[in-house]
Image: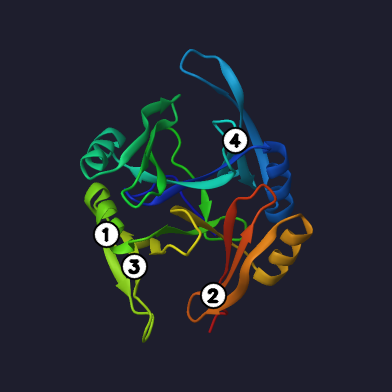
Amino acid sequence: MAKFDSNAQGTPSWIEYSSPDQQASKDFYAQLFGWDYDDQPMADEAGNEFGVYSIAQIEGDSVAGLGPVMGEGQPASWGVYLATDDVDAVVGKARQAGAQVDVEPMDVMDQGRMAWVRDPGGASVGLWQQKSFGGSQRANEPGTNIWNELTVADPAATARFYADILGLEVQQQDMGPDVPPYIMFAAEGRTVAGTMPLQPGMQPHWNVYFNVDDVDATVARAKELGATEFAPAFDVPGIGRLGYLVDPQGASFNLLQNPPEA
């Protein structure tokens, strides 16, 4: 079990689900991952409440957020926040580097300061500056986020953008003959995320991976709950077994089963 109270700049610190049917989404993930929820009212800067933000928890520790979509007709989706030391400064760098700022820096009560930008590759990403709330308190164990992966048309170029605005180190992992290297990001010497080429028919986005004990059993359970399998599960030597799903609301998410211990 890995528990966290802070994150180095550039580390994925929080994952957030936006749903057109929040209760249905909560029920799905609760049954799939065993999550409980702490429902908190959302309010604008004037104090007007406009919905509920659900903190998904495992044994009382926060692992993800679920809220309503912010606009009518918007699809369900998972999003990723990257930790920042100074969100305003990072947004300024992002704008200069060609990003579109979708949500300007704003305070979230006493919990932190956030923004959303769309990188030059077209993927939307959240930025989070910690105050009282650092993000996910657990990761890398069943039912929690274990990996995040940027999917864009030009991974190398977009990786340089993240290196420039967040100080991330860009690394490459050899994937064998006739296969492009896998590009990864490292923060303070620790690998924290990856990036891969966009597949035909897909939009640029950040993928979220959840750790599970058994990918095949989890895929079967997800299908019983109304999800669809986007691609068959497969093994990656040294990494584990991967599964790809689309939940009942239409949001994609992935599974990772750790490889057997030697």
The residue pinned by badge 1 equals 157
The mark closer to the camera, 2 or 1, is 1
Secondary-structure class at tag 1: helix
The mark closer to the camera, 1 or 3, is 1
Residue 82, position in %: x, y?
Answer: 39, 46
Q: Which residue is found at the position 37% from the left and 60% from the top?
A: 153
Quadrant (top left, top right, bottom left, bottom right) of the N terminus: bottom right
What amino acid does circle 4 point to?
Gly
CB under 8 Å between callouts 2 and 3?
no
Quadrant housing residue 129: top left
Instruction: Give the label on residue 240, or none.
Output: 2
Residue 154, position in %: x, y?
Answer: 33, 61
Q: Label 1 neighbourhood size at 10 Å, few (<14), some (14-19), many (20+)?
A: few
How many numbered callouts? Answer: 4
What amino acid does circle 2 point to?
Gly
Instruction: Give the label on residue 137, or none.
Output: none
